[in-house]
Image (cartoon, rainbow, N blue to C red):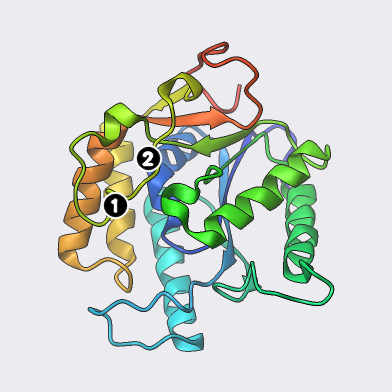
Amino acid sequence: MTSPERLVLLGIFPHPDDESVVAPVLARYAREGADVYVVYATSGERGVRPHFAIPHGQTLGQCRRLEAEAASRELGIKPPIFLGFEDGSLGEFTSPPGKVLRDLTAALEKVLADLRPNAIVTWGPDGGYGHPDHRLLQDVITQLVQSGATTPNLYYFGISHQSLQGASGPFSGFFATDARYLTVHVPFSDADLDAARRSFACHKSQFAEDVIAYLDRFLTQAWSGRVSFRPWFCQHPGEKDSTDLLT
């Protein structure tokens, strides 16, 4: 159980390395004294990459867990929490329908009750670039927030159309968010960006050296010194501009 005096920021993502899109923000709040946690629904055991000679399965999942632990250390945040769901399984057909998502809901509900976060960050409805696990996990988190089970301070990571202009390469497939909805822009320091870059390099099973360099360029351009978010419940675009998640 966390201390009630400390602010808690919680990132919730399906796979190790997904936290990369908000990494400087995680580093910033940890540096400023908040308790920062990242929860992963899966170990990413199906994330096979051509440059990394481990097939999908338990061994790759364990490797990715170790990488996530190393990335957390570089960011200065708490050790990661793994929920143990199978990579790629969140949308599988079950009887009764949605059993995996119901189990995920229960597991997340317990984590939220234990950590009592002041704010949560995750993928938006777009899933970044449409990944089904990203989208489904966001659905479950939003369901828990709108049910009153946890803080209403839920923020979806987003990239505006303007920030994606001229993007090329593997991450150019990101879905843009209308800038009017991106009303929370969290600035970060050079030290936070350096921590994020070190954390990228920990995910060696996913990012070859050229991809790490590309990811750095792409996100540094998209962020432009601040990570942008959309509040999950936004009645009027641009109504509440902010520079902070936790207050």
The image position of residue 191, as x and y in percent, is 29, 37
Q: Secondary structure at mark 1?
A: loop
- Mark 2, Cα crowd under 10 Å, few <14 / some 14-19 / many 20+, is many
Place residue 163 in its image quadrant: top left
- Whether residue 197 is situated above or below residue 25 in the rendered picture: below
Write the residue at 38% across / 51% down. Answer: 20
- Please give the name of the residue rendered at 27% of the width and 81% of the height, measured from the top-left corner: 52
The residue under the point 42% across, 43% down is 22
| In this rendering, position of residue 1 left or right of residue 89 | right
Q: Name the element at disc 2.
A: helix
Lateral position of residue 48 relative to residue 125, left or right: left
**Camera-side residue of 193 and 182:** 182
The image position of residue 1, as x and y in percent, is 76, 50
Question: Can you see residue 197?
Answer: yes
Residue 44: where, in percent of width, then height?
Answer: 49, 72
Please tell me which residue is depicted at 33% across the width and 38% down the height of the picture: 192
Q: Is residue 62 left or right of residue 67?
A: right
Question: Where residue 86 appears, x then y in whole percent?
Answer: 60, 76
**Distance of mark 1 from mark 2, alpha carbons?**
18 Å
10 Å neighbourhood of mark 1: few (<14), some, or many (≥20)? Answer: some
Amino acid of disc 1: Phe
Residue 79 visible in rendering: no
Q: How many marks?
A: 2
Mark 1 or mark 2: whose residue is earlier in sequence: 2
Would you name the residue on which mark 2 appears? 24
Say which mark, if any, is on residue 60. none
Residue on which disc 1 sits: 171
